[in-house]
Image (cartoon, rainbow, N blue to C red):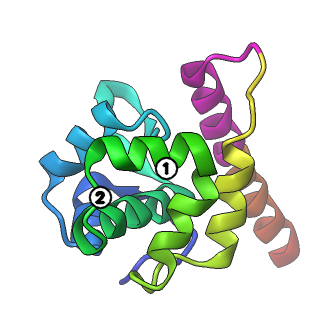
Amino acid sequence: MAKGPNAFRTISEAADELGVPQHVLRFWETKFSFIRPMKRAGGRRFYRPQDIAVLSGVRALLHAEGYTIKGVQKLHREQGLTHVIAAGLGDNGSASLDALAAASLDSLPRGDLADEARDRLVLALDDLQAVKARLDGLLRGA
């Protein structure tokens, strides 16, 4: 059974989808501060659809367009995350305009909330939404 387009991907699923080894994704996280997958207990990475769109853009810039790591960093600094993602839109069918919009929102300043705390809140919200959906299903069946 294949995952839906909005499902989170593990590092192995993301690597397969992008056609790069897992260690490359971990390396890119160290070089590009804008690549921030969610991490659960034990450091397991989960990639959101917008993370896949960002990674697809990075891969397109590095592999297809011949940018260096410093070149992609400069492009991100000067033109923003949407330009990085746009580079991957034609390169990978899984990247969509919805992911582009979500990643654009994700690049806005986050205020005083640390990334780790924000990720925990996002996971808690996802869990609550899943519980609500199950309860709604049970109530409809009753």
Tally the marks: 2
Q: Is residue 117 magenta?
A: yes
Of 33 and 40, nearer the camera is 33
| Residues at marks 1 and 2 touching, judged by CB atoms closer than 8 Å | yes
**Residue 43 appears left or right of 136:** left
Tell me the amino acid under the disc marked 2.
Tyr
Which structural element holds mark 2? loop
* Residue that label 1 marks: 75
Which is nearer the eye, 21 or 28?
A: 28
Which quadrant is home to the N terminus?
A: bottom left
Q: Which residues are magenta?
A: 112-127
Residue 83 % position (x, y): 58, 61
Question: Left of 127 or right of it: where is 31?
Answer: left
Q: Residue flagged by tag 1: what amino acid is it?
A: Leu
Instruction: Give the quarter of the image for residue 104.
Output: bottom right
Q: Which residue is mark 2?
A: 67
Q: Is residue 51 left or right of residue 114?
A: left
For label 1, the crowd category at 10 Å Cα-Cα, with few meaning under 14, some 14 to 19 and many 20 or more, is: some
What x and y, as percent, mark residue 2? 38, 82
User: Residue 100 location, x and y as percent?
Assistant: 64, 66
Q: Tell me if residue 121 comes above or below residue 85 in the rendering.
A: above
| Residue 72 colored in magenta in the image | no
Q: Residue at x 49, y 65 (%)?
A: 53
